[in-house]
Amino acid sequence: MPQHIAIVGAGLIGRLLAWKLLEKGVTVTLFERGSRDGEGSAARVAAAMLAPYTEVVHAERVVFDWGREALDWWPKALQDLQRLTGITVPIGLSGSIAVAHEQDRSSMQQLRQALQAAVPDHMDKVEELDRAGLDALEPALSEHFHGGLYLREEGYLDNRQLLHALDKAIEKLGGQWREHSPVEDIGPGRVQCDGNAQSFDQVIDCRGIGAKLDLSKLRGVRGEVLWVRAPEVSLSRPVRLMHPRYKLYISPRSDHRYVIGATEIESESMAPVTVRSSLELLSALYTVHSGFAEAVVEESLVHCRPAMPDNLPVVLDEPGLMRVNGLHRHGYLLGPKVVEEALGKLDIAVERRT
Ligand SMILES: Cc1cc2nc3c(=O)[nH]c(=O)nc-3n(C[C@H](O)[C@H](O)[C@H](O)COP(=O)(O)OP(=O)(O)OC[C@H]3O[C@@H](n4cnc5c(N)ncnc54)[C@H](O)[C@@H]3O)c2cc1C
């Protein structure tokens, strides 16, 4: 294992790798263009749903298999972080619910069929809910829906609290933070920042969409989310509204806050949320529960998901330089597996050299 590693980009993957490398006794310097609170990262904008079932419908089977592993990984990782930093990161793993209005029943049917085709061996974790079943799990939904689909093995975590806990863990383990430090150039064992080139045993590029100029096939997929606070609505699980045009999800946070998302637009624009997207998200939201009418929109956020042509992550390794990227819409779902792969390759790289 190299002794001094520079990680460029402290979003989700950069922080996870820094934490794990510091635990192994490696010296880590973390360069971040934005701030330690995660501002500037897709990780902070994300809804952070852990949704292998609803995601595999539009993705490769590997997203499901790795994603299910993440459902075991996160609770243990969050316990370790809690012990180290004293910070509790809320995580909910009691499933998610998909619902559709009567006129959109076909969308629900399509979801069922797509799940049956993608994960026929796991359909015992997909439960049809009638009104009583829905009422027992999420009473707030039975105002407008007569049933739904319960995806037992899905959940979410509180991404902002996670970024905070990782920040503190890195600090506690002696990681060197360089925030507000945009890196101008990266090479094997070399990082250039503020006009100064610094040498390291190993550089790991975790810049997400910020690595676009060095990774020609990387593209950004714009996503917009709204944070609302709705004191009249109580939902404890992520909810997806199935609709032929709008793909709406609601990811709960503490104190009646919800992350509402997300658009998926093949564009790398970071311009603020458009009126069209707000209207679509908010009008769909209001049809889920009338209490959302009185919700306050606290924030609207935009970022680009970093994606490769096949929408799967990559760990590219050459001597002195590793690039970890392409997490697309699955950073939280696939991050644990990708970090494990990167750490494994670092060990292997060292074995080869010695
Ligand atoms: C709207 C939206 C919703 C999402 N919802 C989910 C979800 O529900 N579940 C899920 O699993 N995933 C979700 N994702 C995906 C997830 O957020 C990403 O896959 C993940 O954040 C990618 O991690 P990363 O570390 O590669 O990139 P990022 O998190 O973007 O981190 C990259 C970091 O590099 C820094 N950086 C860039 N350039 C430089 C430079 N030159 N010098 C120094 N630092 C630099 C950036 O400031 C940033 O902090 C969502 C994403 C979006 C946008």
Image: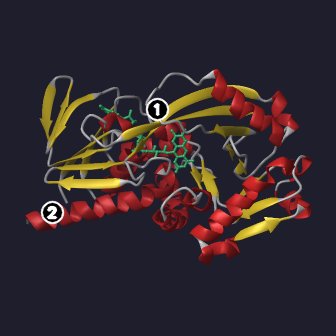
- Residue sitting at x 56%, y 29%: 301
- Residue sitting at x 59%, y 71%: 119
Task: Tell me the amino acid under the disc marked 1.
Answer: Ser
- Residue sitting at x 9%, y 63%: 353
Q: How is the image coloured?
A: secondary structure
Determine whether 83 is above or below 184 in the image: below
Q: Residue 54 at x, y = what percent?
A: 62, 57
Q: Is residue 312 visible?
A: yes
Q: Which residue is mark 1?
A: 267
* Mark seen at residue 350: 2
Quadrant containing ligand 1 reads: top left
Quarter placement of the N terminus: bottom left
Q: Secondary structure at mark 1?
A: loop
Determine whether 310 is above or below 210 in the image: below
Tell which circle, 2 or 1, labels the residue nearer the N-terminal end: 1
Q: Residue 332 at x, y = what percent?
A: 50, 52
Q: Residue 321 at x, y = what percent?
A: 19, 48
